[in-house]
Image (tube, rainbow, N blue to C red):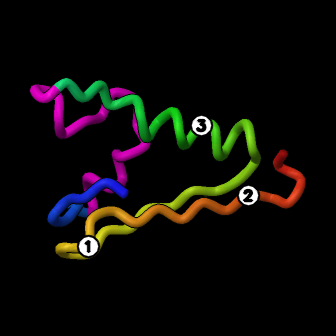
């Protein structure tokens, strides 16, 4: 889990975009969530959603079809 104080709705909407990062100066490339999104949705034909609550960090839900493997 990635811990953050809160992720604003406009940020959540951009989370899976390539090269989007809030940690550019700390070495972030903005590709991690994008790669995971593509693996889950394109390769495994699944779904991934993310939500954020204050002081709870980010919560990801990944759903895969039974025949994904």
- Find residue 18 and report its horizontal and vertical position in percent: 40, 30
- Is the residue 68 above or below the residue 66 in the image? above
> At 89% across and 53% down in the image, what residue appears?
67
Query: How far is mark 2 from mark 1, CA to CA?
Result: 24 Å
Residue identifier under label 3: 38
> At 64% across and 56% down in the image, what residue appears?
47
Q: Give, as a single range, the part of the protein colored magenta.
A: 9-26
- Is the residue 55 above or below the residue 69 in the image? below
Query: How far is mark 3 from mark 1, CA to CA?
Result: 25 Å
> At 40% across and 29% down in the image, what residue appears?
31
- Find residue 3 and report its horizontal and vertical position in percent: 25, 58
Do the residues under discs 3 and 1 have CB atoms within 8 angstroms?
no
- Disc 3 vs disc 2: which is toward the camera? 2
| Total residue callouts | 3
Instruction: In this rendered view, identify the residue nearer to me: 9 or 3.
Output: 3
- Disc 3 vs disc 1: which is toward the camera? 1
Do the residues under discs 3 and 2 have CB atoms within 8 angstroms?
no
Residue identifier under label 1: 56
- Find residue 25 and report its horizontal and vertical position in percent: 10, 26
Looking at the rendering, which quadrant does residue 8 occupy?
bottom left
Is disc 2 surrounded by few (<14), some (14 to 19) or many (20+) residues within 10 Å? some
Query: How far is mark 3 from mark 2, CA to CA?
Result: 13 Å
SS for dot 1? loop
Q: Main secondary structure of the magenta part?
A: loop
Do the residues under discs 2 and 1 have CB atoms within 8 angstroms?
no
Whether the magenta-drawn stretch holds residue 25 is answered as yes
Residue identifier under label 2: 64
């Amino acid at each position: 889990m990635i811990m953050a104080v809160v992720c604003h709705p406009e940020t959540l909407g951009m989370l899976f975009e390539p090269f989007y990062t809030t940690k550019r100066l700390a070495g972030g490339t903005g590709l991690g969530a994008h790669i995971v999104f593509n693996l889950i949705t394109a390769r495994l034909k699944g779904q991934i959603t993310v939500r954020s609550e204050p002081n709870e960090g980010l919560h990801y839900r990944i759903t895969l079809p039974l025949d994904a493997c």
